[in-house]
Image (cartoon, rainbow, N blue to C red):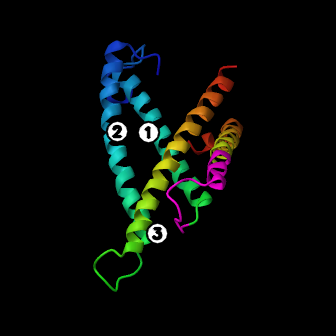
């Protein structure tokens, strides 16, 4: 990506921002789906039970922490791979 | 873009460079999202007793990411071998 000149970098930055927004939406909808499927299975009431509520909170928080940790490790591994390729 | 009749360009145009960078970004994003999903499926049970990552889960994540990268390298090596042997080119 370092071959892009200043103007091209500006243009690319806009694309990156749009994609980040789309990716954030994707993360959100997939998280709703994941936690709903893992936590909500009882349809004897139309309201979430206390148990389901607490499960949803834990599921969402756990997944976000998972995402953060994977992100850190991903960057580390990526840097390692890049430096190996340059050798 | 010579196939559209614009003639071949000696250097790569801005659009081509940006679309290449975009494709790379898309590939990394897709890979990251798949990695996120795969390691979540492999490292977590669905009891959700705590909102924190347990020690086992953290350890599993670290190993999962490392192995995912190794698998990535292995597959790319296999694909290069296939590419060199010309199996894919013969279809042209």
Looking at the rendered structure, the secondary structure element under dot 2 is: helix
x 61%, y 40%: residue: B89
Q: Is residue A79 magenta?
A: no
Which mark, by number, is residue A25?
none
The residue to which callout 1 is attached is: B26
Foreground mark, 1 or 3?
A: 3
Pick the front one: A26 or A49:
A49
- Marks 1/2 in contact by CB < 8 Å: the verdict is yes
x 42%, y 64%: residue: A35
Residue A48 is situated, as x and y percent measured from the top left of the image, at 33, 74
Chain to which the residue tagged by mark 1 belongs: B
Residue A79 is situated, as x and y percent measured from the top left of the image, at 60, 28
Foreground mark, 2 or 3?
A: 3
- Marks 1/3 in contact by CB < 8 Å: the verdict is no
Pick the front one: B88 or A26:
A26
Looking at the rendered structure, the secondary structure element under dot 1 is: helix
What span is colored magenta in the figure? Answer: B46-63
Q: CA distance from mark 1 to mark 3?
A: 29 Å
Q: Looking at the rendering, in which quadrant would you find the C terminus of chain A?
A: top right
Same subunit: marks 2 and 3: yes
Among the 4 quarters of the image, the one containing residue B5:
top left
The residue to which callout 2 is attached is: A19
Residue B56 is situated, as x and y percent measured from the top left of the image, at 66, 55
The residue to which callout 3 is attached is: A38
Chain to which the residue tagged by mark 2 belongs: A
* Left or right of residue B82: residue A8: left
Same subunit: marks 1 and 2: no
Among the 4 quarters of the image, the one containing residue B21:
top left
Chain to which the residue tagged by mark 3 belongs: A
């Amino acid at each position: 990506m370092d071959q892009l000149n200043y103007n091209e970098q500006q243009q690319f930055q806009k694309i990156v921002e749009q994609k980040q927004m789309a990716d954030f939406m994707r993360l959100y909808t997939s998280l709703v789906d994941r936690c709903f499927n893992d936590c909500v299975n009882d349809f004897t009431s139309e309201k979430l039970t206390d148990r389901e509520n607490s499960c949803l909170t834990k599921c969402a928080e756990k997944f976000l922490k998972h995402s953060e940790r994977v992100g850190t490790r991903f960057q580390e591994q990526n840097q390692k791979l890049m430096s190996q390729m340059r050798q | 873009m010579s196939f559209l009749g614009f003639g071949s360009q000696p250097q790569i145009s801005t659009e081509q460079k940006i679309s290449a960078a975009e494709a790379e970004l898309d590939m990394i994003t897709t890979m990251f999202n798949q990695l996120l999903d795969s390691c979540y499926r492999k490292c977590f049970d669905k009891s959700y007793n705590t909102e924190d990552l347990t020690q086992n889960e953290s350890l599993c994540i670290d190993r999962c990411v490392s192995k995912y990268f190794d698998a990535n390298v292995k597959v790319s090596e296999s694909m290069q071998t296939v590419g060199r042997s010309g199996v894919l080119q013969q279809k042209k």
